Image (cartoon, rainbow, N blue to C red):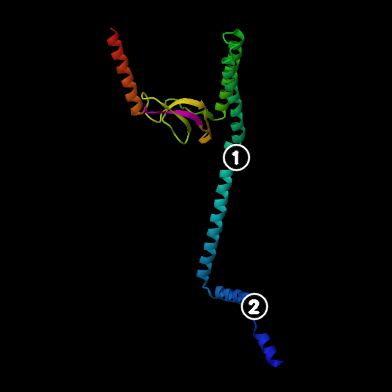
Amino acid sequence: MEKEKDQKSEIKKPEDDKINKDQNKTSEKQDLKPEDRIKELEDKLARAYAEIENQRRRFEKEKDDAFDYGGFSLAKETLNLIDNLERSKFALENDEDLKNSKTLKKTVDHLDIIRKDMISILKKNNIEEIKSIDQKLDPNLHQAMLEIEDNSKEPGTVVQEIQKGFTMKDRLLRPSLVAVSKKVKEKDENLKENQKSEENQSKSNQN
């Protein structure tokens, strides 16, 4: 029985280790010189100040972003209205029953006025159209949807705008969907030249 009691007394609990560690730390701190103790407190104070400063900067950035880009989602949705105006105008202009009618002209004119007003409102809120036609393809602003053979343009030049893109201040609201130029293949060029020469020969033979 006495041996069992001795063994139980020798078993240390985790709580005892923690208490001992805390006591050791306390004794170590007490052993520090006043100058070292002051330096330690200064380091802790500097770290705490740095953390507070970082939090303040994050808060300021979030506040500025909320002020500058709070209407980002609304602006993006508004672009759908402009797209619908464009589609309506295109459908009316290609309606065989309405072509060359005064009603069509008046309706299209009104749609153009509404679109201009909407673009003006967007500009007042720092939302700008992206320039695309004759511009070099910029992956940050343009999304190439197809390629069109055109030797008169440098490869990768925007030659057609499928859907207009917009920016909001320094952020991309949506990219422009575009078609870009590419060089005509040499085989196609040779084929065209051969066809031309054959046509010229046939004309000369007829003469």
Q: Picture quarter containing residue 61?
A: top right
Amino acid at the residue labelled 1? Ala
Q: Secondary structure at mark 1?
A: helix
Residue 88 picture location, percent across and down: 60, 20
Residue 192 placement, left or right of 54: left
Q: Quadrant of the C terminus?
A: top left
Q: Picture quarter containing residue 65?
A: top right
Q: Which residue is mark 1?
A: 66
* Along the line of sight, the residue nearer the viewer: 104 or 165: 104
Magenta segment range?
A: 176-184
Q: Secondary structure at mark 2?
A: helix
Q: Residue furthest bottom?
A: 2
Q: Is residue 178 magenta?
A: yes
Residue drawn at x 61%, y 29% is 78
Residue 115 picture location, percent across and down: 58, 21
Q: Quadrant of the N terminus?
A: bottom right
* Along the line of sight, the residue nearer the viewer: 58 or 185: 185
Q: Is residue 13 above or below residue 82?
A: below
Q: Is residue 98 above or below residue 150?
A: above
Q: Which numbered dot is residue 37?
A: none
Amino acid at the residue labelled 2? Asp
* Along the line of sight, the residue nearer the viewer: 163 or 186: 186
* Along the line of sight, the residue nearer the viewer: 175 or 119: 175
Residue 165 picture location, percent across and down: 52, 30
Residue drawn at x 47%, y 36% is 140
Residue drawn at x 52%, y 62% is 43
Q: Which numbered dot is residue 16?
A: 2
